[in-house]
Each structure stands twice: as structure tokens, then as C-alpha cells.
Amino acid sequence: MGQVKIYGIEELLHANKERLSEIIHSCMMDALELPAGKKFHRFFPMSREHFLFPEDRSEAYTIIEISMFAGRSAQSKKKLIELLFQRTFQRLGLSPNDLEITIFETPQSNWGIRGVCGDELNLNYRVEL
């Protein structure tokens, strides 16, 4: 399971929303072996006055926060981060300096999904990678 929040300046985020979503999901499928149908993305477009960041970032500055079940190896999470940096640069021209990624992990028992706790779900993919 993975829930993704993407923050950025409104105009730029809207212009790249579909491509960015495709990139993020392809990275999660390749690094975490998520099924194609498990795409949960939410975009948070920010006005320039409400999105403050350091001077060494451009207006393309983007934050990706990923919440997921605990259990993936450090290697799998590092692969995800590396793929996100590579693909956003290759496909969108987003500089690695303008992208920040945070992964938040919580036990499956802390999730409520489809009427049950996450640790009671019958998943069609592995979490322990």
C-alpha cells in the first residue's frame, strides 16, 4: 500500500500532474512491486505566497511524501528514491535539487482500508521486499 502526496507551485504542478503521477507510479511498481491498479496520488497545489522554500531551489521545487506499510528493505526504499530522481529528471527535466522525497512507514495494523485493519487485508502483492 502506498499513499502519495505531491506539493508544488500551483501552475507548475497542474501543468505536469499527469506525467508526474505516471512517473511516480512507474517507480513504485519497479522498486516496490506494486500492482498497476494500486495508484493513490493526491496533489497539493500551492500559491507562491504559501509555498516558501530556500533560495537555492527554483520554482519547480516539488515535495513528494509517500506513506506506506512498514516492511520494505532499505534497499527497496533507496531504489524507489533513486528512480524518482532519475525519471523526474529524464522525463520532466526536474533537477534533483528541486525534488525532495520523504517516505513514512507505519505498521499495517495502523491502516484502515476497505472496512478492516491493514494487517487483515488479503494483498495481491508482497510488502516484505
Image (tube, rainbow, N blue to C red):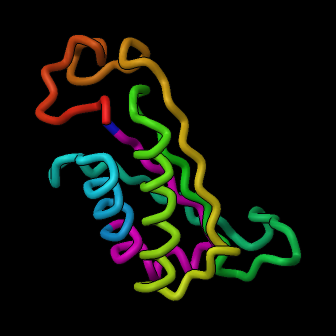
Please name the residue shown 61% across and 60% down the image: 63
Q: Tell me: residue 98, above or below residue 92.
A: above
Q: For residue 2, which quarter of the picture?
A: top left
Q: In the rendered image of this protein, does residue 76 appear above or below residue 125? A: below
Q: Nearer the viewer, residue 50 or 30?
A: 30
**Residue 128 horizontal/vertical position (percent):** 31, 29
Q: Where is residue 101 in the image (x, y as percent from the top left)?
A: 59, 55
Q: Where is residue 107 in the image (x, y as percent from the top left)?
A: 43, 18
Vertical relation: 7 (above or below) 54: above
In-front residue for pair 128/114 = 128
Q: Which residue is drawn at 42% across and 75% down?
A: 87
Q: Say above or below: 31 vs 8.
A: above
Q: Does the magenta segment cover residue 6? A: yes
Question: How many marks can you see?
Answer: 0
Q: Point out the stretch of residues depicted in magenta.
A: 2-21
Q: Nearer the viewer, residue 36 or 47?
A: 36
Residue at image coords 84%, 77%: 56
Residue 17: quarter of image: bottom left
Q: Position of residue 11 (x, y in %)?
A: 57, 81
The structure residue drawn at horizontal position 30% and vertical position 18%, both measured from the top left corner, is 118
- Pick the quarter of the image with the C terminus: top left
The N terminus lies in quadrant:
top left
- Residue 23 shown left or right of residue 96 in the figure: left
Would residue 27 be found to the left or right of residue 84 on screen?
left
Left or right of residue 22: residue 54? right
The secondary structure that dominates the magenta segment is helix
Looking at the image, the residue that sits furthest to the front is 75
Q: Is 6 displayed left or right of 18 in the figure?
A: right
